[in-house]
Image (cartoon, rainbow, N blue to C red):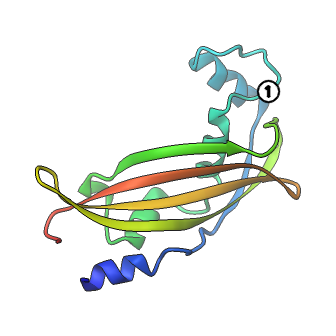
Amino acid sequence: MSDDVQRYTALVGREFPGGAYRIEPWRAWLVADVLGDDPYDETPHPMMAWMASVGGKGMTWDELFAWFGATADDGPMFGEHQTTFHASLTCADYRVTGRITSFDRKVGRRTGTFDIVGYEFDLWRDDQKVATCWNSLVLPRKDAS
């Protein structure tokens, strides 16, 4: 196993700084309208859970890429996503916590070497977990194996 793979694998479990995000009624209205949902529905669109989680992660995307020795110029891509709701989403203040959940190096015949980083964010309203957003990030590697 290469040194960088060992270093990146050791990041599994690392916590994000976390932070806060407020789902404002006007933003919930705009998101619902853009997504073709009913903007007058009192419940924010489920997409707002993901928006709140990444908006309150406590760091920039560039800082996250740097944890794995990558930059935006390397062409990182959003991989998979899954949101699990534990309670109803409302227009309110949320606290965001999160962590790295996995790291895998892959080699594709046509794509070459790339890393897949799994991470998740928990969205909390007061002391109640409202949602967990799991995501993956694909990081192309030019000279790795």
| Number of marks | 1
Image point 32% across, 53% down: which residue? 76
Q: Residues within 10 Å of mark 1 (few under 14, many from 20)?
A: some
Left or right, residue 134 beside residue 38: left
Q: Position of residue 17 (x, y in %)?
A: 63, 69
Image point 71% across, 22% down: which residue? 29
Q: Amino acid at mark 1?
A: Thr
User: 56 above or below 83?
Assistant: below
Left or right, residue 110 beside residue 33: left
Q: Nearer the viewer, residue 88 or 1?
A: 1
User: 96 above or below 88?
Assistant: below
Q: Position of residue 47 (x, y in %)?
A: 62, 34
Q: Position of residue 10 (x, y in %)?
A: 45, 81
Is the N terminus in the top left, top right, bottom left or bottom right quadrant?
Answer: bottom left
User: 32 above or below 9?
Assistant: above
Is the C terminus in the top left, top right, bottom left or bottom right quadrant?
Answer: bottom left
Q: Nearer the viewer, residue 109 or 113?
A: 109
Image point 34% across, 54% down: which residue? 138
Left or right, residue 106 beside residue 47: left
Query: Which element type, helix, strand or loop, lies under badge 1?
Result: loop
Image point 78% across, 15% down: which residue? 40
Residue at mark 1:
43
Q: Position of residue 59 (x, y in %)?
A: 55, 63
Left or right, residue 106 beside residue 125: left
Q: Nearer the viewer, residue 28 or 43?
A: 43
